[in-house]
Amino acid sequence: MPSFSLDPSFSAEPSFSSLSSPALIGREAERELLAAVVRAARDGRGSSVFVLGEPGIGKSRLVEEAASAAAHAGARVLRGRAASAGRAVPLRPLAEAVFSGLRGDGAPSDGELGLYEPLLTRLCGLAPQDGAPLVGYAEAVLRLLQVLGRDGSCVLVLEDLHDADADTLAIVDYLTDNLAGQRTVLLATLRGESGPALDLAGAATSRRTARTVRLARLGPAGTAELAARCLGHDSAEDVPTAVLDRLHTVSEGVPFVVEELLRAMVDGGGLVRGGDSRWTVTGSLDAGVPATVAAAVLQRVDQLPPAGVALLEAAAVLGRRFPVDVAARAAGLDRATALAQLRRASHAHLVSGATTPPTPAGTASATP
């Protein structure tokens, strides 16, 4: 029968140990694609790449590796991020990127940006209010990238575009159409959820002015390799079987959750490293879901309407796998409303199995 399940991360203790993989696992093809577009930008063939995926899947790490490699090769790297918390600030990602690009090496010489210099200055005031057309600010950003990348190349990294305001997205759209022939590459990350940012990425990809990379969850082999690298080994054979079994069951291939679960195992004393550098299971590995994972999940829950939150709260009482109709009755929802909320929760990667409407006796299960 169709099933849905809940993320088990609503109570957790903080973890403090630092366990992370020194290498990017399972992203060889994506890594080579980003390296190729960065190389092409150095030859004057600029382009844009949108990296899509659910929270914790590794979008930022993939893009940061490409940007860091470009910086080591002499490229100017500008970084900006849209923020979901606090007061919305128009154009924040672009203003932040401009500030980061001018930090250290300084601004272009007087006159290099021509009539666009005042527009760029006002953009960095975070909210252009002088009535100038938005396309003027877009061109100002493009001219700055052109100047900064003139002697090598320029990489513009924009994170979390799903949280960006409409003006930021309009400027990004302009950039994707005008980077050809430039020494600049735009690398942007966003969640693969319906919204204006995803629409922008899809439209630019259809016009062939951008590429889209969608990151999938790691399979069992990738999860095992990631665990081994986090624990300082090269082979999954050096990881206790009980550890791998728990990671496969709970993490469902999300790299962030794999790393946080390993931290929780070590912090809880269930996984101990001996003098021979081997890891041994000395107690329970079920130390609860780390606070970092819980916080990430709750942030997604907060974006649901009240009916969706009520449904997930009822489901949490029933267990990780829960009967859909029972959860709906407990939440005081009719079946049609419950199914609509399950679809929203599925798009937010809070439940799995929501793509097929369940039968009256159907069940569901949660994902990290």
Image: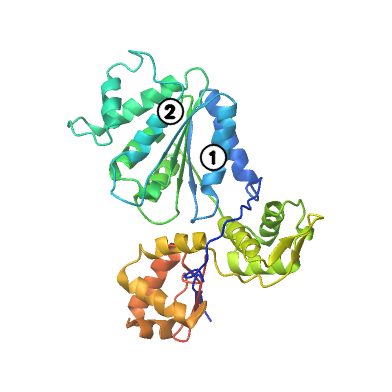
Count neighbours of disc 1 (C-alpha within 10 A) and say few if under 14, some if 14 to 19, many if 20 or more. some
Q: Is residue 295 left or right of residue 331?
A: right
Q: Residue at x 61, y 41 (%)?
A: 31
Q: How is the image coloured?
A: rainbow
Q: Is residue 170 left or right of residue 279?
A: left
Q: Provide the residue designation for mark 2.
A: 101
Between 195 and 69, the one nearer to me in the picture: 69
Residue 249 image position (x, y, % from top left): 62, 70
Residue 43 image position (x, y, % from top left): 55, 23
The residues bearing labels 1 and 2 have C-alpha atoms spaced at a distance of 15 Å
Residue sticking out furthest to the left: 131
Dot 2: element:
helix
Amino acid carrying mark 2 in the image? Gly
Residue 33 image position (x, y, % from top left): 59, 39
Would you place residue 79 above or below residue 352 in this image? above
Q: Residue at x 38, y 56 (%)?
A: 194
Task: Confirm whether residue 177 shows in the render.
Answer: no
Count neighbours of disc 2 (C-alpha within 10 A) and say few if under 14, some if 14 to 19, many if 20 or more. many
Q: Residue at x 64, y 60 (%)?
A: 262
Q: Name the quadrant containing residue 95.
A: top left
Between 143 and 225, the one nearer to me in the picture: 225
Mark 1 and mark 2 lie on one chain; the one further toward the N terminus is 1
Q: How many numbered marks, from 0 up?
A: 2
Task: Confirm whether residue 18 shows in the render.
Answer: yes
Would you place residue 64 above or below residue 73 in this image? below
Q: Which mark is residue 64?
A: 1
Dot 1: element:
helix
Q: Residue at x 75, y 52 (%)?
A: 233
Q: Name the quadrant containing residue 303.
A: bottom left
Residue sticking out furthest to the right: 276
Amino acid carrying mark 1 in the image? Glu
Q: Is residue 128 left or right of residue 352?
A: left
